[in-house]
Amino acid sequence: MPQLSDADTDLIQAVRAFVEKEVKPVANELEHRNEYPQALVDQMKVLGLFGATIPEEYGGLGLSVSSYARIVEQICLGWMSLSGILNTHLMVAYVIRSFGNEEQKQRFLPAMARGEKRAAFGLTEAHAGSDAQAIRTVARRHGDHYLVNGNKMWSTNARTGTMFGLVVKTNPDAMPRHTGISYLIAEKGGPGCTISRDLPKLGYKGVESAEVNFENFAIPTSNLIGREGEGFKYIMAGLEVGRVNIAARAVGVAQAAFDDAFRYAQQRETFGKPICEHQAIQLKLADMATKIEAARLLVYRAAAMKDSGERSDVEAGMAKLFASEICQEVALDAMRIHGGYGYSQEFNVERYYRDAPLMIIGEGTNEVQRLVITKGLLRRAGYVRPPHVTDD
C-alpha cells in the first residue's frame, strides 16, 4: 500500500475532526428531517474537499485516490449522505481531467475545485440502470449546439448543483450500442432542463436523488468531452473512481456500526454482566471487525491500482462488491447487539441499516459487479470468446 504524504495525513485528520465536531452532533436531526446540509457543505468547501482529486494546477488538492478513499471513510463515520455530495462531483471532474481538452479543464476544474460549480451525473434512466447502453436520452447536433431530449433518474446533486456530466446517445442506431454514446457537460440555467421531483428513499437522506427532464435543451458542441461515440469508455473510467468511493463509504458505515455496537456491548448488562462478556456477542464482534478490515484492505488495493494508472475494473468491482455486502451484514449485527434500541430512531444503528443497501445497488448492482469481475479475469487470462457466442 502506498505511503501517504504528511499533508494528506494532516487533511485526513482535519476531516476526522470536522466529522466529530460538526457532523456527528447534527447528522441524525438532518437525516430525519431529510434536510439538505448546506452549512456542512459550506465547511466542506473550506476544507477543499470539492477539489480533492482535482490536480493542483487547476486549483484542487491533487489527492491520490488512496487518500480520497480514506477521506470518504472518515466522512461516512459521521453521515454517509455527505459522501454522495462529493462522489458524483468528483466523478465528473475525473472525466474532464482525464479526457477533456485543455480549454475545458481551464473552464470547469478550478470552479469545481472551489465548489462554485458543483456537478451531478446524468446516466441512469427509468429503463437503463445496470444496462447503461440502453439509455434513450438523445443529443442531436444543430450547428454549434446539441439539442438534448430525454429523462434521467437518481441524479445526486441535480437540484443543488450547477452542471451535469450527461451521458447521451448521439447516434441512437449505432451497433454495437456503446459506440453511439457520448459524454457532454451540461450547465444548468437555460430553458429545457427541469428538475421534476426528488425521489423518496429508504435512506441516504438529506441529499437529493432527482428526476431530470430535458426538452430541446441546448448544449454547446464545445462541451463534448473527447469524441462522439467514445463516451462509454469515459463513463467506465469514471465509475472506477465512483466504485472506490462506494466501497469506502461501505467501510465507513460498517465501522460506524461496529463502533456503536462495540461501545454498547461494554455498557449494556444482562444476567449480571456486560453483554461483551457473553460468548455469542463476542463471536459477532470478532466477525464484524474481521470483515471490516478485509473490506478496507480491498478498498486500499483498488485505490492504489487506480493511482498507478493501471486498469482497475476488477479491483474496484471486488472492493465495491465485498465492502457493500459486509456493510449490510455488520449493520444488521449491530442492530441485533443493540436489541430493541437498535430499532429505535434514538440510536444511529437504524440509520446505518437503512443506508447500507445503497452501496449494494449504487454504481452498478452487485450482480453487475460479479459480471465485471469475471469478464476482467477472463480478459487478463487471455481468454478469446468463440465467434458463435453472443451476449445474453
Image (spheres, grey):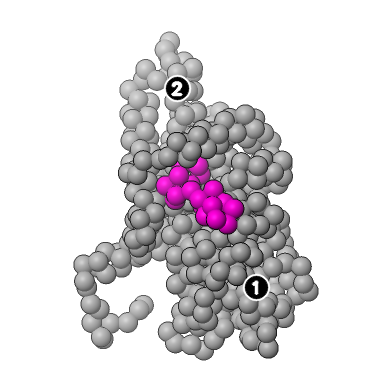
SS type, badge 1: strand
Q: Report the residue at 60% width, 45% height from top.
A: 48
Name the residue type under label 2: Ala
Q: What span is colored magenta in the figure?
A: 53-72
> Residue 241: x, y in percent?
46, 57
Name the residue type under label 1: Asn
Q: Report the residue at 72% width, 41% height from top.
A: 39
Q: Residues within 10 Å of mark 1 (few under 14, many from 20)?
A: many
Q: Report the residue at 23% width, 82% height from top.
A: 386
Image quadrant in which you'd find residue 96 = bottom right
> Residue 175: x, y in percent?
44, 87
Read off the residue under disc 1: 151
Q: Residue furthest top?
A: 272
> Residue 364: x, y in percent?
46, 61
The label on residue 265 is 2
Above or below, 284 against 214 in this view is above
